[in-house]
């Protein structure tokens, strides 16, 4: 009988607030969105790990800057969105594709989640989703290339994943996003609790990631665009009414307001 080795999921910190999510079984590893090669090389060296593959969610430099150096050292295959130009990609991917990492006995499923960038993808594995810069703790990615409708739809797709899904995003933004979330929904008890929990974690320099989709759906205003209290607060801030029963209009107004903070 084959024994199942538990995979570890480790955040390697990079730059000011990026995490390079690393999956390994004490022998082989994959890394997701290596914006910088140096911390990845240091981690792999220290733990005597082979780099089996590099996965990328979108083309921004803070997610891709380390690819070529890592390929030079480890000669790993590089998986990434087919709709974006990223130097080093060997396996272009899109909706419905499966990534198989034989060394780790790992199968990840690809979904398209455009908005932050046009070709942004996410990787699903068991109850985990590696969602790049699309969903953040209590917030969402900025619109650099796509439309509000695209980003809204992509977030809806993530929110439709099972409640116990763990979301691994690329930035430690939860604390930064809390003031806006609380301004949208000051009476949300779970959000207030999350504020306390988040401060406690950050005071100890611990990550707030991953978070469950259940928590996100209960506290992230961008996933709660049909919540009457949130719509009411947005309308107060905007000084005008939003069209009734139009989640996309609420989302668009919310994302634009957030951009002003
Ligand atoms: Zn980005
Ligand atoms: Fe980023």
Image (cartoon, rainbow, N blue to C red):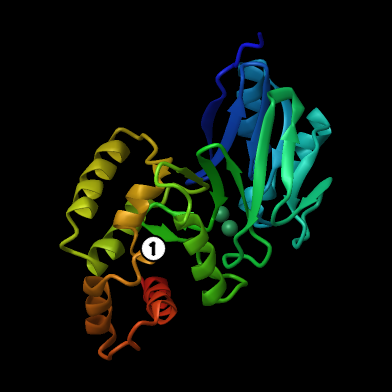
The number of callouts visible is 1
Q: Is residue 166 visible?
A: yes
Residue at x-position 45% and y-position 47%: 162
Q: Is residue 57 visible?
A: no
Q: Quadrant of the C terminus?
A: bottom left
Residue at x-position 63% and y-position 49%: 63
Q: Is residue 220 above or below residue 255?
A: above
Task: Compare residues 218 and 118 and report the one nearer the observer.
Answer: 218
Residue at x-position 77% and y-position 55%: 86
- Toward the top, the furthest residue is 1
| Secondary structure under the numbered disc 1 in the rendered image | helix
Q: Quadrant of the N terminus?
A: top right
- Toward the front, the furthest residue is 1
Horizontally, residue 185 falls left or right of residue 66, namely: left
Q: Mark 1 — residue?
A: 223
Residue 73's quadrant in the figure?
top right
């Amino acid at each position: 009988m084959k024994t199942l080795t538990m995979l570890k999921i480790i955040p390697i910190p990079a730059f000011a607030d990026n995490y390079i999510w690393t999956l390994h079984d004490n022998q082989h590893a994959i890394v997701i969105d290596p914006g910088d090669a140096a911390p990845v090389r240091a981690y792999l060296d220290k733990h005597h790990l082979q780099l089996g593959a590099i996965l990328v969610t979108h083309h921004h430099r803070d997610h891709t800057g380390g690819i070529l150096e890592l390929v030079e050292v480890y000669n790993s295959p590089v998986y990434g969105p087919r709709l974006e130009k990223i130097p080093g990609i060997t396996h272009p991917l899109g909706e419905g594709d499966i990534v198989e990492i034989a060394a780790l006995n790992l199968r990840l499923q690809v979904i398209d989640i455009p908005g932050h960038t046009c070709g942004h993808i996410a990787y699903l594995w068991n109850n985990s989703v590696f969602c790049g810069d699309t969903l953040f703790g209590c917030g969402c990615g900025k619109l650099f290339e796509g439309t509000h409708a695209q980003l809204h739809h992509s977030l809806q797709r993530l929110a439709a994943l099972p409640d116990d899904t763990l979301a691994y995003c690329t930035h430690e933004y939860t604390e930064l996003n809390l003031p806006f979330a609380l301004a949208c929904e000051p009476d949300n008890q779970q959000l207030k609790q999350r504020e306390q929990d988040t401060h406690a974690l950050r005071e100890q320099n611990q990550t707030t990631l991953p978070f469950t989709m259940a928590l996100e759906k209960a506290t992230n205003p961008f996933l709660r665009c049909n919540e009457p209290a949130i719509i009411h607060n947005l309308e107060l801030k905007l000084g005008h009414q939003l069209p009734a029963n139009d989640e996309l209009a609420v989302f668009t107004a919310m994302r634009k307001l957030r951009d002003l903070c």
